């Protein structure tokens, strides 16, 4: 599929449109070579979307070649949308087997009045469109972390680790993704090959700024998640300390009792109180227990 660049994107019609009009070509892996040839681009590398793992761009003699690896909003750690793109002075070729790019262009046509009056404006609209919902996504992560924090404060810590670990992994993934988008925007703004009009490269700076803000937000949420995790660990430590204190109190109370029973358990024939000492031992044991409890109460240990 081919769209002619203009204030509104129009599907190319060979009968009424000039062949060399600046356009956006949408291709699959099978049709990519034909579209590159129509756009007057030569790319010697292999076109294989399965190898796409990062958002990056490289400058070649006749074109800019890049890849986009976009997380799915409902499954950040799962399979991603994988796209290859090629740009020269006049045309853009997008290679996508999932029709994700086609859906993005449909959204641009539906929402934007100035859809693609230039290559720069189209790239700006296209890249902003696939990160347009990410601020809302990060807001959902913030609410999930706040809910976990309230649970920790209320002492509801069961299942906390199973809840916080996926959030941290997904935020780390998103932070790396936004960093890649920011670097790509800066590379486009540098305009090393001179493919873009100098007055139009400002659009790429906006992309970098947007990605930078998203990356900063993801970093803040990671720090927030770490603080909540530390609060959870403090709760665990407090419970363990409370249990250890209880065991210490029991040990302290029973130590003198053990000493008394050990004393009267020795095999001596002439030990005082051996014949009629049971009431006295019981009374002494109760007195020891009461004294220990009094001391612990006074020191506010129990």
Image (cartoon, grey):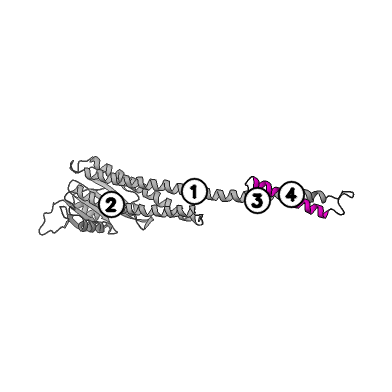
- SS of the residue under disc 3: helix
Q: Earlier in the sequence, mark 1 or mark 2?
A: 2
Task: Check contact, mark 4 vs mark 2: CB within 8 A.
Answer: no
Q: Which residue is mark 4?
A: 288
Mark 2, secondary structure of its residue: strand
Query: Mark 1: which secondary structure?
Result: helix
N-term-proximal mark, 1 vs 4: 1
Q: Where does the image place residue 19, in percent across and percent down from the top left?
A: 13, 54
Per the model, the C-alpha gap separating discs 1 and 2 is 44 Å
Mark 2 Cα shell of 10 Å, populated few (<14), some (14-19), many (≥20): many
3D distance between C-alphas at marks 3 and 2: 64 Å
Closer to viewer: mark 4 or mark 3:
4
Q: Which residue is rendered at x = 52% and y = 49% of the image? A: 233
Nearer mark to the viewer, of 1 and 4: 4
> Which residue is rendered at x = 54% and y = 50% of the image?
236
Instruction: Let me know if residue 45 appears in the view.
Output: no
The residue segment tinted magenta is 275-302
Q: CA distance from mark 4 to mark 3?
A: 17 Å
Residue 69 place in picture, x, y as percent: 33, 52
Pick the front one: 124 or 256: 256
| Rendered image: mark on residue 84 | 2
Element on which disc 4 rests: helix
Query: Is the C-beta separation of discs 3 and 1 under 8 Å?
Result: no
Spatial distance from mark 1 to mark 4, Cα to Cα?
Answer: 39 Å
What residue is shown with label 3? 247
Q: Is 298 situated left or right of 179 in this image?
A: right
The N terminus appears in which quarter of the rendering? bottom left
């Amino acid at each position: 599929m081919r769209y002619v660049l203009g204030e509104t994107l129009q599907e190319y019609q060979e009968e009424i449109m000039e062949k060399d009009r600046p356009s956006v070509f949408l291709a699959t892996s099978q049709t990519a070579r034909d579209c590159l040839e129509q756009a007057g681009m030569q790319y010697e590398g292999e076109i294989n979307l399965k190898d796409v793992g990062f958002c990056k761009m490289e400058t070649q003699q006749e074109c800019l070649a890049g890849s986009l690896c976009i997380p799915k909003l409902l499954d950040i750690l799962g399979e991603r949308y994988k796209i290859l793109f090629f740009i020269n002075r006049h045309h853009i070729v997008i290679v996508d087997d999932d029709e994700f790019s086609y859906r993005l262009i449909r959204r641009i046509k539906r929402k934007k009045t100035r859809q693609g009056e230039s290559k720069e404006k189209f790239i700006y609209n296209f890249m902003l469109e696939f990160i347009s919902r990410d601020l809302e996504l990060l807001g959902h992560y913030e609410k999930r972390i706040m809910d976990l924090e309230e649970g920790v404060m209320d002492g509801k810590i069961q299942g906390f680790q199973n809840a916080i670990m996926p959030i941290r992994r997904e935020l780390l993934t998103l932070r790396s993704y936004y960093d890649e988008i920011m670097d790509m925007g800066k590379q486009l703004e540098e305009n090393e090959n001179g493919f873009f009009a100098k007055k139009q490269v400002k659009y790429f700076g906006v992309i970098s700024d947007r990605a930078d803000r998203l990356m900063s937000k993801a970093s803040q949420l990671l720090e927030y998640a770490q603080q909540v995790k530390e609060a959870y660990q403090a709760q665990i430590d407090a419970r363990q300390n409370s249990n250890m204190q209880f065991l210490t109190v029991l040990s302290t109370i029973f130590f003198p009792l053990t000493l008394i029973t050990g004393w009267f358990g020795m095999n001596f024939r002439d030990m005082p109180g051996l014949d009629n000492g049971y009431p006295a031992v019981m009374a002494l044991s109760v007195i020891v227990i009461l004294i220990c409890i009094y001391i612990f109460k006074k020191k506010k240990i129990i």
